[in-house]
């Protein structure tokens, strides 16, 4: 897809943008990030001054931000913040992405007060996907403050989710996390499966299915846990999600151990590395 390197930058960058969008829609986050990084490198090398290329840079950086948020890891957030810091252009949109990434990173580093201070200072984002990630990070930060704070946050988000299938799917998953922490494993599994059913991207579905499998296992519904883990393993391998594939193997081996089909040593020794 990047073979048309002879094209002028004005023609090549839209192709890279479409490639990044396509890879993200398939859940292939690493491939999307690599393609977008290539486009940004070419743009910076040209050091353009025209507004059309600067607009394209903002679009590529938005996709970089979404890829990092979807990966859900501090190193990915750091890479996206580094890319934003090297931007040729500027503007409110890029500044908002930076605030969002810093807030999300703080929530993953278990710095809930800092995360909420950053995220609550931001106005609601016009970009639906970025706004959803802002709310997800607020929920994660609230969870670090305890289940009471988490439930209060989710109750406040119910009006936000109303009328949108995608938002309701996210909210169901967040409630699934809360119910798991409350020891309500069967309810958690049902909520995570409902969340998966309402998500369009494979990587987003995988996250919910992993959670559903783990909750099913702790609810002693081993057949359900096994079937969900097998589904995760298949899809994760297709889109190159090593961490989720490893989680699927871990759940399968834990289920086998709990059912007396494997020893504790084999569960520990044979667990794959992510």
Image (cartoon, grey):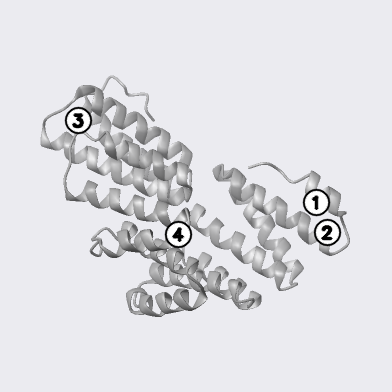
The mark nearer the N terminus, 2 or 4, is 4
Location of residue 66 with respect to 41 vertically, above or below: below
**Side (left or right) of 9 relative to 18:** left
Q: Nearer the viewer, mark 1 or mark 3?
A: 1
Question: What residue is drawn where x is 14% and y is 37%?
Answer: 52
Label 3: few (<14), some (14–19) or many (≥20) C-alpha neighbours in 10 Å? few
Alpha-carbon distance for marks 2 and 1?
A: 7 Å
Alpha-carbon distance for marks 2 and 3?
A: 57 Å
Task: For the residues labelled 2 and 1, say whether their Cβ atoms are less than 8 Å apart.
Answer: yes
Which residue corresponds to mark 3?
10
Residue 66, horizontal then vertical, whole percent: 37, 49
The mark nearer the N terminus, 2 or 1, is 2
Question: What residue is drawn where x is 25% and y is 61%?
Answer: 122
Which residue corresponds to mark 1?
267
Task: For the residues labelled 1 and 3, say whether their Cβ atoms are less than 8 Å apart.
Answer: no
Task: For the residues labelled 2 and 4, say whether their Cβ atoms are less than 8 Å apart.
Answer: no
Q: Please, what secondary structure does the residue beneath circle 4 have? A: loop
**Side (left or right) of 129 relative to 51:** right
Question: What residue is drawn where x is 41% and y is 54%?
Answer: 106
The mark nearer the N terminus, 4 or 1, is 4
Which residue corresponds to mark 4?
200
Which residue corresponds to mark 2?
257
């Amino acid at each position: 897809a990047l073979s048309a390197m002879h094209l002028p930058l004005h023609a090549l960058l839209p192709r890279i943008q479409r490639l990044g969008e396509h890879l993200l829609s398939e859940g292939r986050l690493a491939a999307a990030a690599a393609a977008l990084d290539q486009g940004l490198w070419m743009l910076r090398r040209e050091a353009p001054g025209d507004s059309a290329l600067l607009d394209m840079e903002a679009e590529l950086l938005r996709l970089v931000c979404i890829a990092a948020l979807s990966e859900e890891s501090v190193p990915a957030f750091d890479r996206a913040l580094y890319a934003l810091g090297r931007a040729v252009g500027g503007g409110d949109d890029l500044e908002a992405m930076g605030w969002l990434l810093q807030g999300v990173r703080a929530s993953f580093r278990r710095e809930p007060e800092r995360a909420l201070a950053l995220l609550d200072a931001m106005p609601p984002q016009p970009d639906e996907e970025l706004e959803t990630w802002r709310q997800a990070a607020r929920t994660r930060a609230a969870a670090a403050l305890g289940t009471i704070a988490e439930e209060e946050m989710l109750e406040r988000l119910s009006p936000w989710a109303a009328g949108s299938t995608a938002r309701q799917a996210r909210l169901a998953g967040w409630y699934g996390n809360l119910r798991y922490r409350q020891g309500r494993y069967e309810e958690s599994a049902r909520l995570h499966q409902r969340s998966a059913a309402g998500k369009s991207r494979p990587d987003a579905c995988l996250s919910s299915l992993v959670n559903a499998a783990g909750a099913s296992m702790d609810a002693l519904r081993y057949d359900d846990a096994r079937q969900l883990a097998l589904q995760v393993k298949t899809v994760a391998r297709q889109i190159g999600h090593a961490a989720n594939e490893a989680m699927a193997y871990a759940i399968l081996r834990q289920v086998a151990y709990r059912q007396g089909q494997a020893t504790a040593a084999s569960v520990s020794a044979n667990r794959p590395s992510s």
